[in-house]
Amino acid sequence: MWRSSSIFLGLAVLLLPWAGVRAQGLSADCGSPIGKWDWPTGGVVTIVPGGQLAWTPVADGPAVFTATWACDTNDGQIVIAWPQGITDRLRLSGDGERLDGANDRGVTMTARRWREAEVVAPAGPVPPALVGTWLLEVMLPTPQGPVAVVWTIAADGSYVIDAGPFSHSGTMTAQGGNWEQAATTSNFTDGGTYALPNWARLQTRARSGMGGWNRIRPDLILPVIEVSGQVLPSGLPDLASRARGVAQGWRPDAELVEIEFEQRDNHQWNARDEVQLSYVSPASGGGLVMTIAVDGTRFFAHAVVNWGSGAIPDGFLDLPAVWAIARQHGLMPPLARANLRIWQPGDAPILAWQVSASRGEKRGVSLDGVGGTLLEGDLSGYIAAYNAQWQAAAEGLRRLFAPARQVSSSSADSTSWDSGSSSSSSSSSSDSGSSSSSGYDTASQNSWGAGDMDAYNRIQSGTPTGDDCYRYGC
């Protein structure tokens, strides 16, 4: 369903420019790229009529270098030739707000139309970036033992610090990197400087000491259910929908690109049920990891990530249903790991759950993320790359250990001897290699499908055991 809708969406994007949508450039085939763009490499690109553009580090700044652009009327793509010898081929989105494509080095990119930043007036005596709930990264020693310190800051300047016997609340102000607060529940006062390295991180220097704080959301919790004696996350589609608004507080263009669950060892001191939601910001190139657990959500922001692209759509299959289908295909409980993301093994993207178990003959399956049908083959391309590496290594070993040719005193004899020997050897080697390669390919696939990586590696290296061949068919 999702893939079919993607095809219709793609057709709509291609056809909209023909309908005259934003056709202000040199050709209606490409739409109108005229204007300013937030460029994925940083800086702002200003495209003007006449085939010229300029790159500046900031909007309205002096041009650092210029480039040329043109419309390729054959495929409706905008072609940009940079002075560094790199060429971009980009397509304007149907709404005229995005340029998507790649350069001739294979790097994919997305640019968004530049918009004048709106000046947001503080909602109260503290800036909006400080509003939220923050967890001190170290425990506070108290007579009753270490306690977690949680600092909740409201837009009106009221605050609450939950710190066990040292808890207090009151009012605070913050401006220009300086803050002050006074408790109304005691005579405690504090203040100093603050810095926000990113949306998820707060650093303070105060009269009471220095502190590092991480943003949390105690109200965004993970629903769980028990399935065959194992606690599993549940309601993930609804959770992802609610988490989207939180992620957009980090970046308005935040896109969910992966959901991941991994069963933790219950004997670990910090074991808890949680899922990780990973977001990317196409405009900034940054990433946000949202770890949602039964007791709330933690965040970790990255300035630059390489997590791929492809936003997970609404309406995907929930994890308990995915696990039930995986068990129909032979996986044995407990569920060890599951992740949902978009793969692109061919021309069309595929939304898929990858599910694995820690025991049993079969260790993993890939299922369609919407309908739950079994997906055959390697979605990531890892097996093909792994096999290619083994084949290259084996070929190198054959060359290294190949017997040296004998050279006679007579060039004619040498030629005759070498030719005959080479022909015989080549024929023998070819016959043997063909038979061995065919059997080993089958055994490799069977061992990989069973999740038996030890046998897989032995077969790939040409040293399978008798049991390997019996089980997987060398």
Image (cartoon, grey):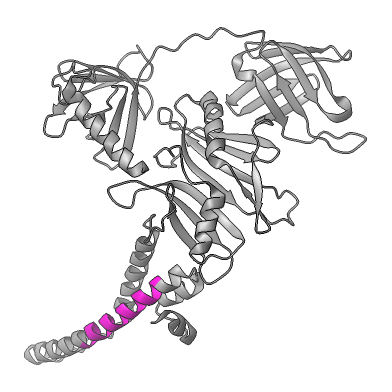
Seen at 42% across and 77% down, the residue is: 459
Residue 356 in the image: x percent, y percent?
53, 60
- Image quadrant assignment for residue 44: top left
Residue 335 in the image: x percent, y percent?
59, 58
Residue 367 in the image: x percent, y percent?
44, 55
Residue 62 visible (yes or no): yes
Q: Would you say 209 lies left or right of 420 here? A: right
Q: Quadrant of the C terminus?
A: bottom left
Where 453 sits versus 16, above or below? below
- Image quadrant assignment for residue 2: top left
Seen at 53% across and 46% down, the residue is: 318
Where 266 sits versus 27, above or below? below
Q: Quadrant of the N terminus?
A: top left
Seen at 31% across and 42% down, the residue is: 4
Magenta span: chief secondary structure: helix
Residue 370 in the image: x percent, y percent?
43, 46
Q: Would you say 7 lies left or right of 330 here? A: left
Q: Which residues are magenta?
A: 428-445
Residue closer to the observer: 292 or 161: 292
Residue 69 visible (yes or no): no
Q: How many marks?
A: 0
> Which residue occupies the extreme right position in the image?
143
Does residue 203 belong to the magenta stretch? no
Residue closer to the observer: 309 or 224: 224
Does residue 439 belong to the magenta stretch? yes
Q: Would you say 87 lies left or right of 207 here? A: left
